């Protein structure tokens, strides 16, 4: 690995090159190896890393970059196109380097521009090395700064500066080569994570530390994972992803002077403006490395940083992971903030439309009266919601033990999927075969819904026994469900596979949603009427036909309750010191308890649809035969001899 130094000029041949200094050797020996998340669909795949740590020359002298100046109340004015290091040297905080593109618009424009720079050889993979000392602290710090062309995270902005630091207890680079580093810290947003050099979490290739810049945000970590950041001590807010697939980069180290120069190759360090265009808040371009606290106070800054970063647990016992819900929520809120930064009107309209949808969804209904004496009754949406809650509360001594059986059943299914999925090596590549990974996916996509269906079926059976006035205890409910166990399992398997296969065609998504709602009551048809699997599907569809909108409203509500309640109840715990594992377990427990509420709600809806079917005339079938286009979607004229169905 070659090293470029302020004090080292390559000669015409190796024979005439001067011997490398101890400092040059130190910088080269400890230059980091970076593992970045590899794109599968470049260049616009924002969940992976679209950029590489590169040279500032990608923007300096670039004809698509404009140097602008903030002139106070008059806004921005263009100063110069394609500014060089000479042009920006010594400029203050009113100056901005405006790259080609809009950070609040189509951000893939930056990725495409960077691909062009790479193809031309104008974006070499480099890291900027800097020796930092601090008065009152013995030794020195060796910093490696990464410059990134664009920051594709919650806070979208042009350019990004991140990196890492090694600390040595000696003042001599020569002795540092002998002793090695004592500690290191990785830069993460406005903070960092420190470790002893010999800490087990510090991965090395010989003397080179292996580090993991997060996709898009470029915060640097010690391993491959998803890190949940709550904003504490400069950690950022959101989820930093360094997970597989990964590819290795070995940036060429370029040694910068200890102090900020006003002349020479590194005069750009004296630019105190911003390396991106002016925007509001977090979308503003960042300042250079010489403006950061660690540049002049490496040891004091390091002492105040974290010694760990919370990782997203590899899998939940059951249900949606609370931490994953946190990641998605922060991303959604950040998207709204970015929208507001671009257009306040668009953000306001979005919020107003969302509020209207919520009011229409939950507001137009009757919420009472509530009657538990007759379960087979017609009910409004509001009555269904309240009756399900009250029925759960009245019989919680039976329902809670039933629903807690979800923990070993669904948890065991998840653990089985995890066993087949296995782990990954240091490079982020799975250590399992393709067949094993396929089995893990199959268990995860099909096994978990079936396991959940078993628990829900016991609750449905419990409600059936209550409606029939029969003994309805824990053992009674399980015994009655087991009599029809295989039909319940096979019916759920068919429903899951059928909807999934239709959904993945993309064009069939509307039909998949329609069928998902139409087949909601297959379990009830099996458990209440003892129908065959085929008749259960037909019976469920018949109940929903003509009442689809009434059905979908309640079905969506009950399922949303199951999905979001656990994450919402434990969301605030992310901002505490409680372990993510415990937060996830608490969210999983809430999810388990809500399986029963959803099953009770769906069963009361089943009773409601039965009551409506008895009181209303039969809903006519429509013709959905594509080979009869004139009849497609129409009610057949039976009297005229048209075929039914």
Image (tube, rainbow, N blue to C red):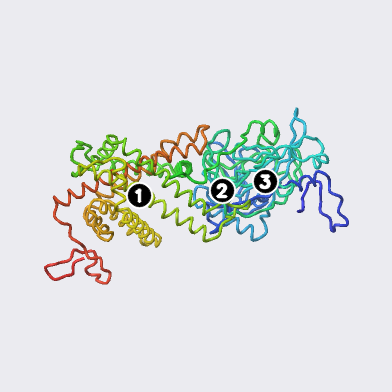
Q: SS class of the residue under badge 3? A: strand
Residue depicted at x 77% and y 50%: 4
Neighbour tally class for label 2: few under 14, some 14-19, many 20 plus, Cα within 10 Å: many
Front position in the image: 215 or 537: 537
> Residue tagged by mark 2?
216
Which of the labelled discs sits on residue 344, or is there none? none
**Residue 341, visible in the rendered structure:** no
How far apart, in angstroms, are the residues tagged by discs 3 and 1?
44 Å
Give the answer, above or below, for where 14 lies relative to 477.
Answer: below
Q: Report which residue position mark 1 lands on.
A: 454
Give above or below for 619 relative to 83: below
CB contact under 8 Å: marks 2 and 1? no
| Disc 2 to disc 1, C-alpha distance | 41 Å
Please provide percent x and percent y for residue 431. Answer: 59, 55
x, y percent for residue 534: 27, 61
Q: Which of the 4 quarters of the picture holds residue 278?
A: top right
Closer-to-camera residue (184/284): 184
Q: Earlier in the sequence, mark 3 or mark 2?
A: 3
Q: Secondary structure at mark 2?
A: loop
Q: Is residue 419 visible?
A: yes
Residue at numbered disc 3: 203
- Does residue 547 appear left or right of residue 232 in this picture? left
Q: CA distance from mark 3 to mark 2?
A: 22 Å
Nearer-N-terminus badge (3/1): 3
**Nearer the N terminus, badge 2 or badge 1?**
2
Q: Are marks 3 and 1 in contact (CB under 8 Å)?
A: no
Mark 1: few/some/many CA within 10 Å (<14, 14-19, 20+)? many
Which corner quadrant holds the C terminus? bottom left
- Identity of the residue furthest to the right in this view: 16
Whether pointer 3 and pointer 2 mark residues with C-beta atoms closer than 8 Å, the reply is no
The residue carrying pointer 3 sits among few (fewer than 14), some (14 to 19) or many (20 or more) residues within 10 Å by Cα, namely some
């Amino acid at each position: 690995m070659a090293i470029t130094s302020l004090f080292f000029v390559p000669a015409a041949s190796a024979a005439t090159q001067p011997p490398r200094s101890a400092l040059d050797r130190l910088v080269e020996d400890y230059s980091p190896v970076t593992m970045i998340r590899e794109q599968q669909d470049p260049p616009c795949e924002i969940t992976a890393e679209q950029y590489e740590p590169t040279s500032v020359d990608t923007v300096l002298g670039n004809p698509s970059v404009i140097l602008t100046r903030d002139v106070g109340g008059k806004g921005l004015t263009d100063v110069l196109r394609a500014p060089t290091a000479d042009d920006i040297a010594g400029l203050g905080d009113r100056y901005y380097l405006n790259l080609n593109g809009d950070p609040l618009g189509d951000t893939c424009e930056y990725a495409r521009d960077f691909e062009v720079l790479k193809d031309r050889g104008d974006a070499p993979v480099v890291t900027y090395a800097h020796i930092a000392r601090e008065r009152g602290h013995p030794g020195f710090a060796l910093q490696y700064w990464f410059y990134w062309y664009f920051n594709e995270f919650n806070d979208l902005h042009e350019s990004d500066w991140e990196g890492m630091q090694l600390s040595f207890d000696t003042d001599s680079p020569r002795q540092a080569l002998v002793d090695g580093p004592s500690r290191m810290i990785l830069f993460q947003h406005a903070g960092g994570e420190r470790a002893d050099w010999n800490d087990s979490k510090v991965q090395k290739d010989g003397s080179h530390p292996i580090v993991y810049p997060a996709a898009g945000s470029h915060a640097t970590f010690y391993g491959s994972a998803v890190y949940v950041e709550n904003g504490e001590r400069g950690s950022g807010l959101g989820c930093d992803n360094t997970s597989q697939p990964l590819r290795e980069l070995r940036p060429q180290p370029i040694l910068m002077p200890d102090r900020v120069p006003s002349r020479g190759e590194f005069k750009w360090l004296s630019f105190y403006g911003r390396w991106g265009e002016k925007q509001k808040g977090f979308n503003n371009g960042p300042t250079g490395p010489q403006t950061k606290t660690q540049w002049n106070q490496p040891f004091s800054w390091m002492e105040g940083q974290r010694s760990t970063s919370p990782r997203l647990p590899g899998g939940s016992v059951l249900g949606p992971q609370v931490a994953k819900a946190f990641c998605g929520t922060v991303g959604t809120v950040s998207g709204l903030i970015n929208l507001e930064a671009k257009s306040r009107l668009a953000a306001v309209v979005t919020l107003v439309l969302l509020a209207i949808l919520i009011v229409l969804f939950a507001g137009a209904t009757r919420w009472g009266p509530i009657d538990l004496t007759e379960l087979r009754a017609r009910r409004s949406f509001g009555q269904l919601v309240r009756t399900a809650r009250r029925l759960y509360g009245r019989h919680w001594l039976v329902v809670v033990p039933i629903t807690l059986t979800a923990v070993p059943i669904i948890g065991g299914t998840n653990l089985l999927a995890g066993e087949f999925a296995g782990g990954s090596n240091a490079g982020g590549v799975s250590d399992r075969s393709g067949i094993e990974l396929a089995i893990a996916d199959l268990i995860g996509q099909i096994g978990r819904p079936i396991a959940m269906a078993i628990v829900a079926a016991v609750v449905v059976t419990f409600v059936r026994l209550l409606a029939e006035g029969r003994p309805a205890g824990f053992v009674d409910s399980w015994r009655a469900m087991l009599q029809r166990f295989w039909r319940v399992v096979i019916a759920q398997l068919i429903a899951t596979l059928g909807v999934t296969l239709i959904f993945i065609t993309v064009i069939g998504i509307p039909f998949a949603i329609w069928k998902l709602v139409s087949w909601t009551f297959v379990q009830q048809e099996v458990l209440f009427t003892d129908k065959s699997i085929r008749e259960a599907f037909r019976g469920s569809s018949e109940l929903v036909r003509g009442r689809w909108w009434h059905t979908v409203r309640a079905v969506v509500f009950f399922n949303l309750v199951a999905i979001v309640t656990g994450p919402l109840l434990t969301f605030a715990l992310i901002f505490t010191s409680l372990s993510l594992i415990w937060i996830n377990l608490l969210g999983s427990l809430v999810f388990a308890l809500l399986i029963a509420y959803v099953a009770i709600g769906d069963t009361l809806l089943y009773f409601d649809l039965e009551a409506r079917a008895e009181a209303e005339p039969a809903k006519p079938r429509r013709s959905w035969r594509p080979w009869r286009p004139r009849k497609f979607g129409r009610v057949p004229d039976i009297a005229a001899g048209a075929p039914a169905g």
